[in-house]
Image (spheres, rainbow, N blue to C red):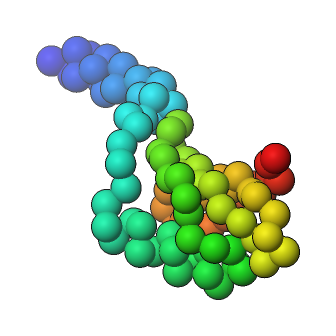
Amino acid sequence: MRAPLASLALLAALAAPALADELPARAATSEEVRMIALVLKAEGFAPCSALSLADGRWTCRTTNAAGEAMQLSLSNLDFAVTRRTRVQ
C-alpha cells in the first residue's frame, strides 16, 4: 500500500514545477490594480496603461518621470519591479 502512495507523491512533486510554468493569464483584480499603482507611484512611474499577467509575471506599460515609455515586469507576489525596458 505504501509503494503506490509513494509513487503518487513522487509524481505529484515532479508535476508541480511543470504546472507552475503554465500559470493561466487573467485580468487583475481591483486590489491588485490598487497595489500595483502604489508600487509604481513609489518608484516614480505613472499608472499602467496596459496590464496583463502571463507566465506568472505582471507586465505593464507606463511612463517614467522623464516621460519615457516603459515596459515593466512585476513580481506576482509583492508587485516589485523586476525588469524595466524602454519602448518606442
Q: Taking the image as drawn, is residue 42 in sight?
A: yes
> Residue placed farthest to the left in the image?
1
Q: How many marks?
A: 0
**Image height of 54 relative to 87, above or below:** above
Instruction: Determine the residue positioned at 56% across, 71% down.
Output: 47
Instruction: Determine the residue positioned at 56% across, 63% down.
Output: 48
Position of 41 compared to 88: left or right? left
Position of 50 compared to 7: left or right? right
- Residue 22 image point, x, y percent: 45, 29
**Image height of 52 relative to 28, above or below:** above
**Image height of 50 relative to 77, above or below:** above
- Residue 78 image point, x, y percent: 52, 68
Position of 14 compared to 29: left or right? right
Q: From the image, which quarter does the N terminus lie in? A: top left
Position of 33 compared to 21: left or right? left
Q: Taking the image as drawn, is residue 75 in sight?
A: no
> Residue placed farthest to the bottom in the image?
42
- Residue 18 image point, x, y percent: 47, 25
Instruction: Determine the residue positioned at 59% across, 50% down.
Output: 59
- Residue 32 image point, x, y percent: 39, 66
